[in-house]
Amino acid sequence: MNQYARMIVVLVIISLVAGAVLAFSYKVTNPKIQEQAQQALQQAVLKVIPGAEKMTAVEKQGMTLYIGMDNQGNKKGIAFKTTGSGFSGPIEIMVGYNPREGKLTGIEILSMSETPGLGARIKEPAFTDQFKDKSVSDEFIPKKDVKVVTGATISPTAVSKAIKSSLAEVTKIYPVGGDF
Amino acid sequence: MLKELFFIIIGSVLVNNFVFSRFLGNCPFLGVSSKTETAVGMGMATTFVLTMTAVAAYFIQNFILVPFGLAPFLQIVSFILVIASLVQLVEMVVLKISPALYNAFGIYLPLITTNCIVLAVALLIPQKNYNLIESTIFGVGAGLGFTLALILMSGIREDLEFSDVPDALKGPAIVFITAGLLAMIFLGFAGLVPL
Amino acid sequence: MTQLIKDFTNGLWNENPIFRAVIGICSALAVTTAGQNGIAMGLALTFVLTCSSILVSLLRSIIPPKVRIPCYIIVIATFTTMVDLFMKAYFPPLYQVMGIFIPLIVVNCIVLWRAEGFASKASLARSIADALGMGLGYAWAITLISIVREVLGSGTLFGINVMGQATHWVIMLLPPGAFLVMGILVGIMNMIARKSVKNTHCH
């Protein structure tokens, strides 16, 4: 076999084997990856809606909303995902909202790449807990009605802005005082 | 639109400089930053390859990997192969078209394949959901940021030759410490543009 | 057998990729903000390095010299993607922290350096010994960097508070801290080895 043919054959065989091995690994790990993502989502939703035991997802006006219910099927609140632009990348936040009372029921930071020890402290309860029972008509301005516990202002501002702007959309679908 | 592009370029050159704040491309950063002349050559070559990679990554991701459902597991392999062939291609084309240009930065081309900035840019483009123009600008910005870091460092290192550095810190150690001080300066750009 | 031990210990100290050869440092600077990140990254790299070295060593007589680099790259990229998928599936919190630096193992000079410089010329047993030594040498080095940065930056060690409020030097967790700690540690290693690193192997 001449030299070039051998080169091509070896390269093609290696690529094919690599492709097959990867396709197989993907097939094995993918269900687990999906499951992890689903689980993380469910956990976050249940965490931001107190009393909720299960959830259903609904699509409304291009938004995905999660309705949390207790075991009897009583609706306990709504949760939605929003994204803010932080210091070093997007911050994904899950927000719990109770239209009947017009209050937030909690928030949870899903993913972010802020600086550890600084902006990353928005993940800590000291920061996230203050959004519990916060009225949706508040201003959401750091250092005014949002405590900045992190020493940095960029990350808390990103979180507050993202919540406020997506609340504007969500309250159009589920107005304060209305049912859901 | 223009505003977003401006933000991308300032973001990748100054605020999130690829070397000083994203820690990418540190191997060549240490290796070729001892002379300003080579730093400029390496920077230009890398910027050129990065721009082409950004465009290629955009097309591969959106027209091959995603439509065929291959993105989750063939992304890394296909991007690195495309980068390697692209670098080879650029080298051959430059040699054919302009030997002068080849002499200026051709020798740096083979080293670029293993510069992690290139693969990182390719991988970040799908993550950030950039369109074609944004991707291109992102590639250019990454290259300019890398070039800036190289030139700054080479300028300092040329002077460092004549300084009295403690024996143990000679070589890479003092370069790291210098880079640390430069990185501190770059922290000052934080918040210049919304990311 | 002595040869194998020699190959293994070579990476741990004499040619330690981080402190002596000073290559593959991007990930060593980027993910080292907490102790467990260092260990996880070290293990991920050791896995890719060992598997790639095994394959490269086994295929060394089959792969034509002219296309050896593309072949090595495909092999390395395959194992890297496997680690990437595996971490995504079983360790999502760690995966989030490492982010892009897991896929970037492909272009980590250490892997190609050992594949090209050692495994492509040596027997299987020697390649495994060398890869394990290099991988663990990388792992202990970046774990040490992580520990220093975590203790100084957040006052904790593997998440357990050890310094109280004494050291909350956030700068250590920020990029400048990474460079400074790295520079000082390389300097200390130079003092221990009583000779300074002349040149980097990579580029």
Image: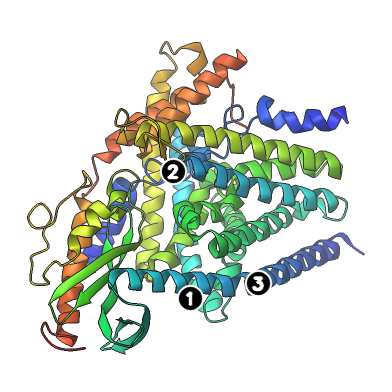
Q: Residues within 10 Å of mark 2 (few under 14, many from 20)?
A: many
Establish if B25 lies above or below C167: below
Residue assigned mark 2 = B23
Foreground mark, 3 or 1, reads 3
Residue positioned most to the right: A1
Label 2 near label 3: C-beta < 8 Å? no
N-terminal of the pair, mark 1 or mark 2, is 2
Chain hosting mark 2: B
Q: Marks 3 and 1, how far apart in space?
A: 25 Å
- Using residue A91 as the reference point, say whether residue A167 is left or right of it: left
- Numbered badge on residue B62: 1
Residues flagged by tags 3 and 2 on a common chain:
no
Label 1 near label 3: C-beta < 8 Å? no
Residue assigned mark 3 = A28
Give the amino acid type for the residue marked by disc 1 in the picture.
Asn
Give the amino acid type for the residue marked by disc 2 in the picture.
Phe
Instruction: Kindly state the secondary structure of the residue where label 3 is placed.
Output: helix
Q: Quadrant of the N terminus of chain A?
A: bottom right
Instruction: Kindly state the secondary structure of the residue where label 1 is placed.
Output: helix
Residue at (67, 45) in percent of width and height: C112
Residue positioned most to the front: A72
Residue at (61, 61) in percent of width and height: C81
Q: Marks 3 and 2, how far apart in space?
A: 33 Å
Residue A7, by quadrant, is bottom right
Chain hosting mark 3: A
Residues flagged by tags 3 and 1 on a common chain:
no
